Amino acid sequence: MSDKSLTAKERLAIERTHMPEQPAEKRARNFTEVNLGLAEAAAIEEARRCLLCKNRPCVQGCPVGVRIPEFLERIAAGDLRGAAEILRADNALPATTGRVCPQEKQCEAKCVRGLKGEPVAVGWLERFVADWAMEHLAPPSAPTTKTGFRVAIVGSGPGGLTAAGELARLGHDVTVFEALHAPGGVLRYGIPEFRLPKAIVDREVKNLQAMGVKIECNVIVGKTLTVAEILREFDACFIANGAGLPVFLHVPGENLKGVYSANEYLTRVNLMGAYKPQGRTPIARGAIAVVFGGGNTAMDAVRTAKRLGSTRAILAYRRGRDEMPARAEEIKHAEEEGIEFMFLLAPLEILGNDDGWVRAVRLQRMELGAPDASGRRRPVPIPGSEFELAADIIVVAVGTRANPLLTATCPDLKLNKWGNIEIDANGMTSIPGVFAGGDIVRGGATVILAMGDGKTAAASIDRYLRENKVARR
């Protein structure tokens, strides 16, 4: 049936589909992807729920501007190739965003259907089309016309990869410099296999390489190279090295064995394969794991601890459930897997045994007071409410900040008081030809916001090159 043959009443009568999942008791013991993907018939039926609104509010909610109604209409008509072509043209990493993007706060939050029911499952359909394209279509090809301009990208995370793809599509010669031994940035080291399989990251990277993007790993800009040296060889540079310096609790005992930052904990597991039976990277394991934080990173860490064998995997958060910034889907999955949530608690001290290992954490109960600068109610200590909680592993997931490794070697780069790079309205830094985006500018944010910055910066870089530079032929 053609999508346009449906009336609005018929569309409204279609209920939102369900995403098949691994059973909770099974998935809590493995690192295989939780969500199993939609069948083609279910995807087509879900796409038929779209009302094809004239004002297209869903597009306004997408940081990378995917033409959502068009690609949904192609799915509904059974034209998966057409849907894939639209999606690939608008989004450099569609299989990734279809899995980890918080659509419920962005495109789906703007969906008109959500006013009186469930929004269209845009994220699940994006994943379905991207996965279908990987299996049925050849990788995108490099443009035949080259501009002669060379652009360097610092960091192969979501912002850097998006900018690289956009610039390559425009005909520029793009080289991505990655500090680690494999590309993907936070997509590889920060997000667990059960949410984003690394095979997906590999396939998306290969698509970009097919477009002509070159990736050089083990290059630490700030050590191996400086920005000044990059500008001698390249016509422009985009800095997207993230904000990978962990924030700690600043309580006694954080130097005990068994205490990790979420960055180290997840990097050991995700990038270095510590979860694999044959993995050679050590990782501490124990019966009781306590993770501090309330965001997606904290959720990833506590669910990872459960899979690594902790019989009690506890997430302790200083505010309440309603204030948690983590995705609702991740909270739901965690609860189903047996994760324990302990709200309105703040750590006072981490306690150790005679061998220098964690044995417990001393906590204080909190209550919510007036809103702080973030708009959330500020947690206030309750006097005399301290108690001890036994723990074998502590993971701190309370945020990150800018790593000064790059910026310390670039004195002309203007920073704000938090150490993040300042940019103008076009995404350019205080150094001509050097642009920046993602977490190094925003502070810790989401994958899709970094991608939006990458896409915006690519357009600005293209304009800057054409208006200010003579191509290196």
Image (cartoon, helix red, strand yellow):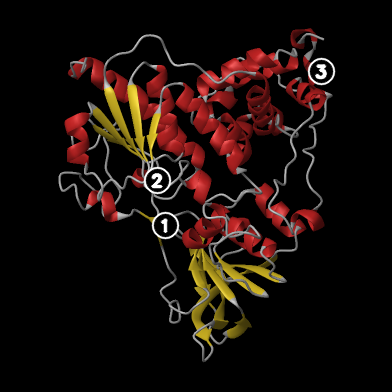
Q: Is residue 161 left or right of residue 343?
A: left
Residue that numbered label 2 is attached to: 439
- Say what amino acid the circle numbered 1 marks: Thr
Rendered position, 278 above or below 389 = above
Q: Are marks 1 and 2 in contact (CB under 8 Å)?
A: yes
Q: Which quarter of the figure has residue 28?
A: bottom right
Mark 1 touches mark 3? (CB < 8 Å): no
Q: Position of residue 417 (x, y in %)?
A: 26, 55
Query: Where the C terminus falls, by quadrant?
Result: top left
Residue in view at x 61 percent, y 63 percent:
320
| Residue marked by disc 1 | 400
Q: Residues within 10 Å of mark 3 (few under 14, many from 20)?
A: few
| Relative horizontal placement of residue 13, taking residue 427 as reference (left or right) | right
State the residue at coordinates (69%, 16%): 80
Q: Secondary structure at mark 3?
A: helix
Let me know if residue 393 appears in the view.
Answer: yes
Secondary structure under tag 2 reads: helix
Quadrant showing the N terminus: top right
Badge 2 amino acid: Asp
Q: What residue is shown with label 3?
A: 9
List x then y, in percent, for residue 53.
Answer: 64, 17
Badge 3 amino acid: Lys
Residue 126, percent from left and from top = 64, 28
